Image (spheres, rainbow, N blue to C red):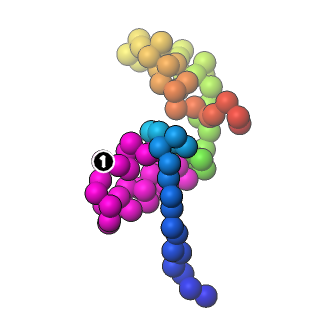
Amino acid sequence: MNDTLRITLELVQADNPPLYTDLARFPKGPRRVNRLRTLAFAGLLAQWAPHVAPAERFTAHDDRGNAELSKATLELFGPSIDS
């Protein structure tokens, strides 16, 4: 079994403007491919990361008194709405 995947990708700006803009920063070649590889890996990590517990469990024990900041951070990096 061959352990290499060859992928030809055509990306139209209208399909995914943020991704297109990010990849267009690099000239075609290894840097663009490496950036796409990095983004794909980060996406996999985000998809399979364990879910964060609800913010209410942590705000009562915030030693620095930043309960609102802690709650906002946990909300931002918590599980997706689809979960």
Q: Residue at x 35, y 49 (%)?
A: 24
- In the rendered image, the quadrant that contains the N terminus is bottom right
Q: Residue furthest bottom?
A: 1
**Residue 61 can be seen in this image:** no
**Looking at this view, is 71 or 22 the one in front?**
22
Name the residue carrying label 1.
25
Q: Residue at x 62, y 34 (%)?
A: 79
Q: Is residue 61 above or below residue 12?
A: above
x, y percentage for residue 58?
A: 54, 22
Classified by dominant secondary structure, the portion drawn in magenta counts as helix
Q: Is residue 79 above or below residue 71?
A: below
x, y percentage for residue 63?
A: 41, 18
**Looking at this view, is 29 or 71 the one in front?**
29
x, y percentage for residue 76?
A: 52, 27
The magenta segment is: 19-45
Q: Residue at x 45, y 39 (%)?
A: 18
The secondary element bearing badge 1 is classed as: loop
Amino acid type assigned to the residue bearing label 1 in the image: Arg
